[in-house]
Image (cartoon, helix red, strand yellow):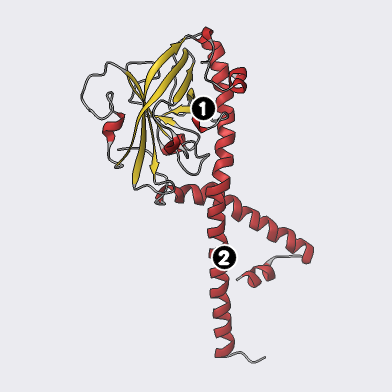
Amino acid sequence: MSGGPLLSFRGFLRGVAELMLTAGVVLALLVFYLLVWTNVQTSAAQQDLLEEFRTEKARSAGKAPEVSIGEGLAVLYAPRLGADWRWVVLEGTDMGTIDDGPGHFAETALPGEIGNFAVAGHRATHGEPFADLDRLVEGDEIYVETTDGWFTYQVTWSRIVAPTAVEVIAPVAGHPGKKPTEHTLTLVTCNPRWASTERLVVGAQLVQTRAPGAGPPEGLDPAAREES
Amino acid sequence: MYAFLWRILPGPVPAKLVQALALAALAFWLLMYVVFPWVEPHLPLDQVVVG
C-alpha cells in the first residue's frame, strides 16, 4: 500500500465519521440521562427523605417543623394526580434541592402559617412531580402532612405567568406588599412542559387543619393513610 | 481514533476488551455524574422557579 494524499484523506474522513458517531452516542446518552437517569436518582432521594421525615415526625411529637435547606419539610398529596402521588417537599428552591423533589421557597410561609406556602417543582425530568399540575381544577383537595399536623387546601385558581412573576409567591398571592390574613398554598412549575418560557401556577386555600393525633384527612387514599 | 486506542491498549485481545469496556464505563460515569449535571442548567428546559 502506498501512502499519499488518498490514504490521508480517507484517514481524515474516518476521523470525522468517528467524531460524529461519538457525538450521536453522547446525545443519545443525554436523552437517557434526562428521561431515565434523573428520575431514578430523584426516586431514590425521595425514599430516603420520606424515611427521615417519618422518623422526625415520630420524634418531634407534634412540634412545628424546623428544617434547613435541602431537608424534608412536609409531604404533599393530591388525589386528583393519582392515589400514589406523594412527594416530600424540601426546604429551598436552589437547583440541587429541587432535583430531589418539590422545593419550598424558603422566604414564604410554612404550611399552616398565615401567608402563602409556596412550592416549586419540576414538570419534566427529576421525577417530574408537577408533570400534571395542569390537571388540577378548582375545588380539588391537596393535603400537606407536616410534623405538626395535616393541612387540607382546596384549589382556588390556576394561571400561566411570566418567569419573572414573583408576585405569585407573595404572602398574598398576586398582591406583593399586602399584609396576609389567610392561609394559602401556591404551586409553581414550568410551562409548557419541557420548556421554560412561562410558569404554570396553581393557588389553593386552607380549608381544614388536623392535629397529628387526628390522623390523615378522610379524602386521602387508604393505602397512603395506612403508611402515614 | 478508536482503532488507534485499540492498538495502544496492551495485552492480548481479551485483555484489550476488558480495558476497552472499563474505559467506556468510565466515560459513562463521567457523563452521568459530571458532564450532564453541569450541562443541564444551561438547557432551555424545566426552569421552574419565579424570580
Classify residue A168 by image quadrant. top left
Q: Are marks 2 and 1 in contact (CB under 8 Å)?
A: no
Residue A123's mark?
none
Which element type, helix, strand or loop, lies under badge 2? helix
Whole-percent x, y for residue A24 in the image = 55, 64
Residue shown at the point (51%, 33%) measured from the top left: A81
- For label 2, the residue is A22
* Label 2: chain letter: A
- x and y, in percent, of residue B8 in the image: 67, 68
| Figure check: A193 above or below A120 | below
User: Measuring 58% from the left and 29% from the top, which residue is drawn there?
Assistant: A84
Answer left or right for A106 relative to A47.
left
Q: Earlier in the sequence, mark 2 or mark 1?
A: 2
Q: Nearer the viewer, residue A176 or B34?
A: A176
Query: Residue A108, position in %: x, y?
Result: 33, 24
Helix, strand or loop under label 1: helix
Please name the residue shown 48% across and 44% down the image: A124
Disc marking residue A79 = 1
Look at the picture and state if B25 lies above or below B2: above
Q: Amino acid at mark 2?
A: Thr
Q: Chain of mark 1?
A: A
Q: Between B22 and A51, which is closer to the camera in this rendering?
A: A51
Q: Nearer the viewer, residue B13 or A75?
A: A75
Q: What crowding class fits label 1: few (fewer than 14 Cα within 10 Å), some (14-19), or many (20 or more)?
A: some
Residue type pointed to by label 1: Pro
Quarter of the picture containing the C terminus of chain A is: top right
Percent across and percent down for residue A12 are: 54, 79
Which quadrant holds the N terminus of chain A?
A: bottom right
